[in-house]
Structures are given as C-alpha cells and as structure tokens.
Amino acid sequence: MGIVMGPNQYGKAEVRIVSVNRDTPRHTIKDLNVSSSLRGDLDGAHLTGDNSKVLPTDTQKNTVYAFAKEAPIGEIEDFALRLGRHFVGTADGITGARILIDEYSWERIPVGGTGHDHSFARSTDEKRTTAVTIDGDQAHVVSGLKDLIVLKSTGSEFWGYPKDKYTTLAETNDRILATAVTARWRYLHTDVDWGKSFESIRATMLEAFATTHSLALQQSLYEMGKAAMEKHPEVAEVRLSLPNKHHFLVDLEYCGLENNNEVFFAADRPYGLIEGVVKRDDVDEAPQAWYSLPQF
Ligand SMILES: O=c1[nH]c(=O)c2[nH]c(=O)[nH]c2[nH]1
C-alpha cells in the first residue's frame, strides 16, 4: 500500500487583461479575466520537487499578455484555443491545458445620440464565458454566460408539491420568477462562428424564459436548454444553474391595504438552487475533465 499523486493541474488564475484596439480613433476594448491550467507529466514536481516540467505560472501569465499584443484577441474561444494549443505544443511534458475566460461587457457612452469613440460604461454584471480544454491534439469548447439576471412579474406558478408537517409554503398560481442565469453549453466541434452562436443561444434562452408559462423553475430550465439546442446543432448539451431569487408578497393587511401581487420583499438568501443538464440522448457525456480537474 502506498500513497500516490492523483489528478492535478496548475496555472495562473484570473489574469486581468484590458486590451485597447487603437487602429482608428474609434477604439474598441476587450476586458478579460483569463485563467490557465496545465496538466501532464507533473509527478516529479509533486513527488520530488523536480521542476523541470513546470512552466512557471508567471510565464503563463506573461504569455496571456504577449498573445494579446501579437495578434488581435478576437472571440474568447479563439484566444483560449490559441493559448491552450501553444502551451501543449511547446511546453515539455505538458499534455493538456484548460483555459477559462470571462469577458466583461462594455458599452459606448452615448454622447449627442451616438456612442463615444473612447468612453465606455459597464451597465451589467453579466459575463460571457468560455472553458477550453486541450487534451493532446484534441480541443473541446464549453462556452456560456454568468450572472444574466432575469425576472417575470407573472406567468409563473408553483403548486402540486408534496406537503409534510414542516411545509409552510402556500401554493401559488401567480408569482414573480427571478433568477441569475449561469449557462454553459458544450460544442460538438470547433468549426463554429463563436460570436454568432453565443448571441443566438443567449437570445433563444431569454425568449424561452420569457414565453414559458412556468410551473416551476425546473420547467423553465428545461425549456431554455431545449430551445437553445433545437436551434443549435453544434451544441451537445446545456448546463444551467439557476438560483431562485425569491420574492415574497408583503402582507399589508395590518394597515388595511390589499396587496394584489404588487408589492414584494426581494430576499437575497436563502435561495433555491435549480441546476440541470439538458442534453441530446444520442451524444455521449463529456468527461468530467472538461468541466474541472479530472475526477474532482
Ligand atoms: O420553481 C420552484 N421550484 C422549486 O423546487 C421550489 N421549491 C420552493 O420552495 N419553491 C420552488 N419554486
């Protein structure tokens, strides 16, 4: 019986990079948070302190910045693929890489009716995301979004659930439904117009959220994933994590007011957390390693 080193990866987390394209006076900006993790022949590093296969995390960070200068960043998926393939293709003993990128969105500040050339405002917490896994000569892309906050002021019910002696929740056929969408979708291949696919999947999921008369957030989750996948054959599965941002009707009877689903208390915690994978029944599951560390 012995003790061995299990799955591992290492890299630089959260390299913040803002890149300004100054080709014309009308600047464009890319604001990214990039994390790299390398995998491979790293037993020596863990077992004996042999760093001969350990490309420093500092070098990984420098590579991110240098790549942003050497060529336009482009879509985050393409930037992540370039970085991942570079590490696996050039670093001795490194056979796999994971590159995670969050992209923050900036809008031009309107001045006199048009967007300003070089002044921007960030009006939302929403992030576009990608997670690229390079495994030898294979590349896998899981893209998505985080913190897209949505709310329906009606068109949501919740009833028909089991009751026991601890149940206090009243059944309702008219409530607020609100959530902060985290979605990740797995592409079947890399021959994709990333920007177009992202915009369409986002819009499709939003439309499904809006138009589904929801009997539970679980049902909305499925309808959102299903709608995206029906339109996008390049997607194998959609994973959704949806916190149920509860809105409780305020009891105004004490002061003689009838509250007809108009005034709510927005609770920040606790929240229900509704999560699930919507997938094609004829496509194999992705290895866990495409989502996090192998076997974690
Ligand atoms: O959409 C919902 N799903 C639940 O599982 C649940 N549980 C709960 O208390 N409220 C809700 N709402």
Image (cartoon, rainbow, N blue to C red):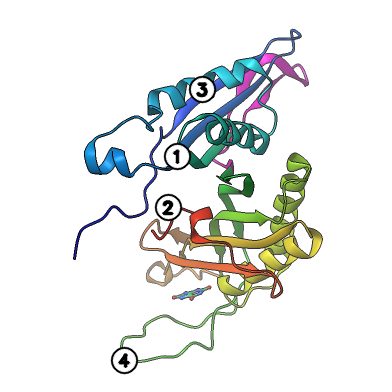
Q: What residue type is labelled 1?
A: Ser
Give the mark, 3 or 1, whose residue is nearer the N terminus: 1
Q: What stretch is highlighted in magenta?
A: 105-129
Do the numbered discs 2 and 1 sit on residues whose CB atoms are within 8 Å?
yes
The residue indicated by pointer 2 is 293
Q: Considering only vertical position in the picture, is 99 above or below 188?
A: above
Residue closer to the observer: 209 or 138:
138
Q: How crowded is mark 4: few (under 14 residues within 10 Å), some or many (20 or more)?
A: few
Residue 232 relative to residue 90: left or right: right
The residue indicated by pointer 4 is 165
Q: Considering only vertical position in the picture, is 66 above or below 132?
A: above
Residue 140 relative to residue 172: left or right: right
The residue indicated by pointer 1 is 37
- Residue 80 position, x and y percent, is 60, 36
Residue 271's mark? none
Q: Considering only vertical position in the picture, is 199 above or below 185?
A: above
Residue under the point 67% across and 35% down: 78
Residue closer to the observer: 270 or 248:
270
Q: Considering only vertical position in the picture, is 67 above or below 133?
A: above
Residue under the point 69% across and 75% down: 281
Residue 191 occupies quadrant: top right
Residue 159 occupies quadrant: bottom right
Give the mark, 2 or 1, whose residue is nearer the N terminus: 1
Q: Distance between the residues labelled 1 and 4?
A: 49 Å
Residue 63's mark? 3
- Quarter holding the C terminus is bottom left
SS at mark 2 in the image: loop
Whether residue 263 is visible: no
Give the mark, 1 or 4, whose residue is nearer the N terminus: 1
Residue under the point 48% across and 61% down: 243
